[in-house]
Image (cartoon, rainbow, N blue to C red):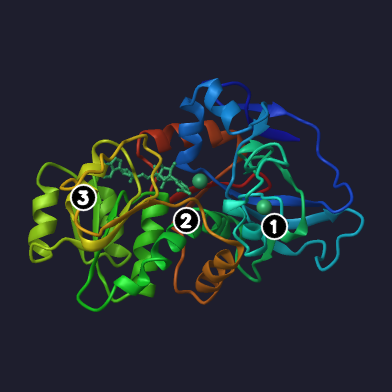
């Protein structure tokens, strides 16, 4: 079968012919219905070999860590799944046995890496291929009547901001504000999730007017270009106080100072973006009692909640679909900022 692979550090992804996997006992083979193109893959492509080694990645591997499809075959001992059943693949693959994994938080597995990487598409073969081998049925969530191509981004582009927002919901009362910096794949879902889950006024920030128009369509109350005036404008909009929640979905040296400047006293500054920036923490550098955190992905039960929101029509990813042979071009467009919402590769369309 064909697969889009990372073959070496700092090399372009390559479409290659690889063997179609067979599920061994306990494993599940998924026919891929959709594999989202996440900006993290562009970071992966830039990281030096030492970084990939540190993360325990084994090269080459097939990229694509936001996946959904249909059960194609199950290994011995797998019960509770039907061939042909549509499923979303939970992305961070933990040990399944530690305390965090048993809380369904495999994103924070205490003994990660036993599968040879962080998850399918992150050091282990992922979903940009016709078939994806999943090590355990524990990592699959049935999606009912959702189209796998539309469900795929929910496993990361929606799950990651869902977790980031949910942990701060107690701070978002009527009259509160929430800022989303970067309205791309994750950010556009963050706007929808804030709209559905909280009474907060949503302020969306991006460098691209088209992304801001999308944010407005999806329910952002205010939109703002990310420039030298953004911090002051947001402070003015929030009566000088700043926002209860700031989600920095870019995380570089341009956005982190903005994020810190518009976080309210006792607010949450949550960094989802892996843009490589640094935020110096000092007494006057961040607002009093503000919490600054990074978050990584979300739990399996949160994925179930996100899928429920989508099935009931309350959120939906803005998706464009593309055949596997176009995947390299899709990543070029993502790099140039020319993808609206999420681009999804559909290898079996
Ligand atoms: P994307 O390319 O789809 O979207 C990025 C958006 O940020 C674009 O709309 C772009 O115009 C905007 N942007 C760029 N520079 C900006 C700036 N200076 N100010 C405001 N907006 C700016 O990317 P994505 O797939 O949504 O991923 C976003 C980030 O989140 C990436 O760094 C990715 O690696 C990271 N990520 C983190 C997790 C996690 O678990 N923490 C999960 C998935 C992705
Ligand atoms: Zn991702
Ligand atoms: Zn674990």
Q: In terms of secondary structure, where does tag 1 sit?
A: helix
Mark 2 beta carbon near ligand 1 (under 8 Å): yes
In primary-sequence order, the first of circles 3 and 2 is 2
Image location (x, y in percent) of residue 84: 78, 62
Mark 1 beta carbon near ligand 3 (under 8 Å): no
Mark 3 beta carbon near ligand 1 (under 8 Å): no
Q: Residue at x 58, y 52 (%)?
A: 107
Q: How many marks?
A: 3
In primary-sequence order, the first of circles 3 and 1 is 1
Instruction: Write down the residue under mark 1.
Output: 139
Q: Is residue 329 visible?
A: no
| Crowd rating for badge 3 (residues with CA inside 10 Å; few <14, some 14–19, many 20+) | many
Instruction: Write down the residue under mark 3.
Output: 286
Q: In the image, 303: left or right of 206?
A: right
Q: In terms of secondary structure, where does tag 3 sit?
A: loop
Q: Residue at x 26, y 58 (%)?
A: 290
Q: Residue at x 66, y 41 (%)?
A: 126
Residue at the farthest front position: 283
Separation (CA) of disc 3 from disc 2: 24 Å
| Crowd rating for badge 1 (residues with CA inside 10 Å; few <14, some 14–19, many 20+) | many
Q: Quadrant of residue 125?
A: top right
Instruction: Write down the residue under mark 2.
Output: 160
Q: Is residue 311 visible?
A: yes
Image location (x, y in percent) of residue 68: 64, 55
Image location (x, y in percent) of residue 64: 59, 42
- Say above or below: 311 vs 52: below
In primary-sequence order, the first of circles 2 and 1 is 1
Q: In terms of secondary structure, where does tag 2 sit?
A: helix
């Amino acid at each position: 079968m064909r697969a889009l692979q990372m073959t070496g550090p700092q090399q372009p992804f390559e479409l290659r012919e690889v063997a179609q996997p067979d599920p061994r006992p306990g494993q599940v083979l998924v026919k891929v219905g959709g594999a989202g193109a996440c900006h993290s893959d562009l970071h992966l492509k830039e990281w030096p070999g030492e970084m990939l080694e540190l993360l325990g990645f084994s090269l080459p591997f097939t990229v694509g860590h936001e996946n959904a499809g249909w059960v194609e075959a199950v290994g011995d001992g797998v019960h509770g799944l039907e061939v042909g059943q549509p499923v979303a693949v939970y992305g961070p693959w933990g040990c399944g046995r530690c305390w965090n994994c048993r809380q369904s938080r495999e994103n924070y597995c205490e003994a990660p890496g036993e599968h040879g990487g962080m998850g399918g598409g992150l050091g282990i073969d992922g979903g940009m291929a016709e078939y994806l081998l999943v090590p355990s049925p524990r990592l699959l969530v049935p999606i009912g009547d959702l189209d796998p191509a539309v469900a795929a981004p929910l496993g990361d582009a929606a799950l990651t901001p869902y977790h980031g927002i949910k942990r701060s919901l107690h701070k978002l009362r009527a009259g509160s504000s929430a800022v989303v910096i970067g309205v791309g794949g994750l950010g556009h879902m963050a706007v929808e999730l804030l709209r559905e889950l909280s009474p907060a006024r949503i302020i969306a920030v991006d460098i691209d007017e088209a992304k801001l128009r999308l944010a407005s369509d999806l329910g952002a109350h205010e939109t703002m270009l990310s420039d030298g005036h953004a911090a002051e404008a947001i402070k003015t909009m929030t009566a000088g106080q700043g926002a209860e929640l700031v989600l920095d979905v870019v995380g570089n040296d341009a956005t982190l100072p903005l994020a810190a400047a518009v976080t309210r006293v006792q607010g949450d500054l949550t960094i989802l973006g892996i843009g490589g920036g640094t935020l110096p923490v000092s007494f006057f550098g961040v607002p009093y009692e503000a919490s600054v955190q990074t978050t990584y992905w979300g739990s399996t039960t949160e994925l179930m909640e996100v899928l429920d929101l989508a099935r009931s029509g309350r959120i939906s990813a803005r998706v464009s679909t593309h055949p596997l042979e176009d995947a390299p071009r899709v990543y070029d467009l993502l790099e140039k900022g020319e993808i609206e919402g999420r681009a999804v590769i559909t290898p079996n369309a």
